[in-house]
Image: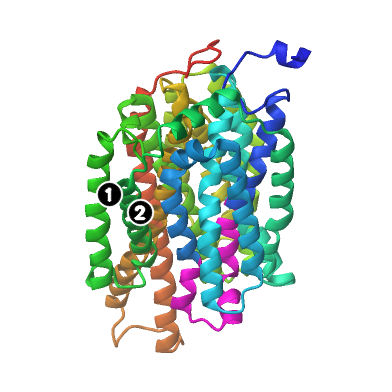
């Protein structure tokens, strides 16, 4: 029998709330995402300590990060299919279990091989969390309320990467690197228990799954293979590009050819496939296609800038891991505080207008970093980051709400999978781009500055070695500002695309 609360809510046949408040479900499904997104940045801070403990060299240690990213990238695009076949709630709980158990096993690792194996499993579990959660939120809230719920969800996606370095730095400096994995245990157990008790698997999804299984699995083996090989190769390429000397390396060149061939074939193959592993045809919907592209840019900007600033403060300003993390954490608090305002703005104004303004603001914030100097203090760094993340809530919430407009209701899982794939792919490409451009511009500026030093130059009492170090420091800082200048140009050039987005329908109760 329906309660008064359920009778007062609009009937949403695909809702994961059942008899409970949709907001309770929103909070519950955000727990695991916070855990997973936090882990993407918290581990990077402790990487040097982990590799030292495991007796791994710097190049070998990068596979601790790469192994997670590769398995994560493979699972993301097919998570919609897996959710439909296994059942959304069951698939979600399996992902939480895999992520939590593998986190425990990573903390117990005594060798690099052991660590990498469990990081792969952790990536598999982490890859399915966000798409399943976003599908639940899109199906549980009507279009006119999605801005509010994605504000809550955006807190986990945008704030967790910001506070990750703070938490990771503190745990590593004060306890040990093992705690960057052990911290996932209470989140995982709590998420699993609450999901089991409160999250509902609606009848319509159960019936769709039974009908799907009755027809037979119709597994798209070719699509799965192309996803695994194509996205796996692309992720390894992006993560190892700088370390392997770019396209001068036969290994990188080979990965580039493999990923290009596989992903091109994947798009052609899936377009007409009756049961695709990745539903590429969703790109026919204009709002979703634009949203996916903007989500790529958000990932590109968020992850590249998140890596750049603490890297700059540690390598050039001499900050330790905790202090560098704090410079990001202050911006994270600003992001959290702006979430409600972004939700209100999304309900009152066209998403395209909000996105355009936010993208321009992001570009201006990136440009501001280019005006700083090596004499900047902690608060200069913290405010520079705060200006950058000011726009993020006004990007993430409107694009999350607008991306489902016009989509068939039964495609929310596939849409969430592709959207998250684009955000993660944008992040990986953004980090790779920042590293490559940073190295190239550093070499350029070093050569230019060195040209000005001749045998007759007055060294002002400094040795040649001291001058060389000063030149390298100045060149590195100029390279960082060049990267931020490029990020600013990207943001300032992409904003007109957002004006083509359709506005989510107001008052519509169940249609996408």
Q: In the figure, is residue 252 to the left or right of 90?
A: left
Q: In the figure, is residue 195 to the left or right of 356?
A: right
Can residue 367 be seen here? The reply is: no
User: Which residue: 41% across, 39% down?
Assistant: 217
Of 106 and 410, the residue lying toward us: 410
Marks 1 and 2, how far apart in space? 7 Å
User: Which residue: 72% across, 24% down?
Assistant: 21
Of 454 and 141, the residue lying toward us: 141
Give the percent coordinates (x, y) of residue 47: 56, 71
The kind of secondary structure the magenta stretch mainly shows is helix
Of 208 and 19, the residue lying toward us: 208
User: Which residue: 45% across, 64% down?
Assistant: 66
Q: Quadrant of the N terminus?
A: top right
Q: How many marks?
A: 2
Give the percent coordinates (x, y) of residue 340: 64, 29
From the viewer's perspective, is residue 213 above or below residue 308? above
Of 88 and 221, the residue lying toward us: 221
Q: Which residue is label 1 attached to?
A: 263
Q: Which residue is label 2 attached to?
A: 231
User: Which residue: 55% across, 68% down?
Assistant: 314
């Amino acid at each position: 029998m329906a309660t008064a609360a359920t009778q007062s809510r609009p009937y949403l046949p695909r809702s994961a709330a059942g008899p409970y408040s949709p907001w309770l479900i929103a909070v519950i499904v955000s727990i695991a995402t916070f855990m997973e997104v936090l882990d993407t940045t918290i581990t990077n801070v402790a990487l040097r300590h982990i590799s030292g403990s495991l007796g791994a060299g710097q190049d070998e240690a990068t596979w601790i990060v790469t192994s997670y990213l590769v398995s994560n990238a493979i699972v993301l695009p097919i998570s919609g299919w897996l959710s439909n076949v296994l059942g959304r709630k069951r698939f979600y709980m399996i992902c939480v279990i895999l992520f939590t158990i593998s986190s425990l096993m990573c903390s117990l690792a005594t060798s690099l091989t052991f660590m990498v194996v469990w990081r792969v499993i952790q990536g598999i579990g982490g890859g399915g969390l966000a798409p399943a959660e976003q599908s639940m939120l899109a199906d549980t809230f009507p279009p006119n309320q999605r801005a509010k719920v994605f504000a809550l969800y955006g807190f986990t996606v945008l704030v967790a990467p910001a506070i990750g370095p703070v938490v990771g730095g503190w745990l590593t400096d004060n306890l040990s690197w093992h705690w960057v994995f052990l911290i996932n245990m209470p989140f995982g157990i709590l998420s699993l228990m609450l999901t089991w008790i409160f999250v509902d698997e609606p009848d319509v999804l159960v019936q769709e799954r039974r009908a799907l299984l009755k027809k037979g699995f119709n597994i798209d083996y070719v699509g799965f293979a192309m996803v695994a090989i194509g996205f796996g190769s692309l992720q390894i390429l992006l993560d190892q590009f700088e370390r392997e000397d770019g396209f001068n390396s036969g290994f990188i060149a080979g990965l580039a050819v493999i990923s290009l061939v596989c992903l091109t074939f994947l798009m052609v193959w899936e377009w007409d496939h009756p049961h695709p592993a990745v539903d590429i045809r969703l790109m026919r919907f204009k709002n979703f296609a634009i949203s996916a592209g903007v989500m790529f840019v958000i990932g590109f900007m968020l992850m590249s800038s998140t890596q750049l600033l603490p890297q700059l403060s540690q390598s050039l300003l001499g900050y330790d891991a905790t202090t560098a993390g704090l410079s990001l954490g202050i911006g994270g608090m600003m992001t959290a505080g702006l979430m409600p305002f972004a939700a209100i703005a999304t309900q009152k104004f066209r998403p395209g207008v909000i996105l355009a303004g936010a993208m321009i603001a992001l570009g201006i914030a990136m440009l501001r970093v280019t005006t700083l100097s090596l004499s900047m203090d902690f608060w200069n760094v913290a405010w520079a980051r705060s200006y950058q993340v000011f726009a993020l809530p006004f990007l993430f919430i409107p694009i999350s709400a607008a991306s489902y407009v016009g989509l068939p209701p039964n495609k929310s899982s596939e849409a969430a999978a592709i959207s998250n794939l684009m955000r993660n792919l944008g992040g990986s490409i953004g980090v790779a781009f920042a590293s490559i451009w940073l190295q190239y511009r550093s070499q350029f500026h070093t050569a230019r500055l060195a040209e000005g030093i001749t045998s007759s130059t007055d060294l002002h009492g400094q040795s040649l070695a001291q001058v060389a170090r000063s030149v390298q420091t100045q060149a590195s800082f100029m390279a960082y500002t060049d990267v931020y200048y490029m990020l600013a140009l990207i943001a300032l050039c992409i904003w007109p695309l957002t004006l083509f987005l359709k506005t989510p329908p107001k008052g519509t109760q169940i249609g996408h």
